[in-house]
Amino acid sequence: MQQEWLHVGILSPLPRKTLPEIAKIVGLKDGQSLHHFLRDAVWDVQQVRATRLHMIRQVIGVRPMTLCIDETGDVKKGRATDYAAKQYIGNLGQTANGIVSVNVYGVVDGITYPLMFKIYKPKSRLKVGDVYKSKPQLAVEIIRELLALGFVIERVLADSLYGESGDVTGILHQFQLPYIVAIRSNHGEWKPKGQQIRYNRAARL
């Protein structure tokens, strides 16, 4: 039954889909039973992810998608959560103790599909056997994996963290993927000979 309650909560219009909030709308006293279900359920994360991507791939088919790359974070207290550290949390707009992930979404015909995410592992929290990877490097891995799965990418959108990364722009050029990315005003880029660029300064009120 917990699985059905979780589905109801995930599909609900709740702004924050936490277990306590989901428990409230489905009539449970608290979120403990949902927590125990997630904690004790036996499943393979990679298999669940592969199944979900396969189902999305079936729905989208060969329709080209706009790929959106971004990172998000959640504030965490202490260091009990793996890879939680003091770092910039984008959705807060400031530095805080938390966990950050690189997320990629596909937009097809006005519908947004959550595709993949990878946890960013700060150097200070690496475990034995971990290899440090920057956020742009994680984005590159995701792009490669999505292409290998057969997703058709029409264009890529990203902010300056990825727009200024040679790793990201390099793979986009390698696979000839059109892209629109942000760069900071003090960031220089080499452009093809003869290409003209017009700079529009935003008007100040």
Image (cartoon, rainbow, N blue to C red):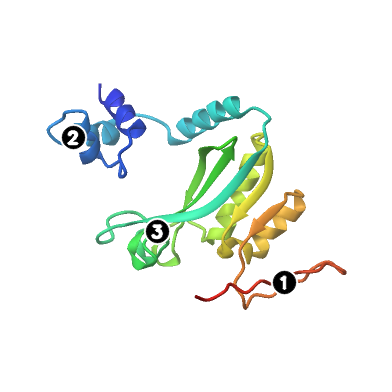
The kind of residue tagged 3 is Asn
Classify mark 3: residues with Cα within 10 Å, few (<14), some (14-19) or many (20+).
few
Mark earlier in primary sequence (2, 1): 2
Image coordinates of residue 26 in percent, x first then y, are 21, 28
Query: Depth check: 117 or 189 in front?
Result: 189
- The quarter of the picture where residue 31 lies is top left
Mark earlier in primary sequence (3, 1): 3
Label ID, residue 91? 3
Relative placement, left or right, of 110 versus 153 is: left
The residue under the point 56% across, 64% down is 161
Image coordinates of residue 175 in percent, x first then y, are 75, 48
Residues tagged 3 and 2 counted as in contact (Cβ below 8 A): no
Q: Which residue is mark 2?
A: 24
Image coordinates of residue 1 in percent, x first then y, are 25, 21
The kind of residue tagged 2 is Lys
Image coordinates of residue 12 in percent, x first then y, are 32, 33
Relative placement, left or right, of 180 versus 75 is: right
Q: Which residue is mark 1?
A: 189
Query: Depth check: 144 or 199 in front?
Result: 199
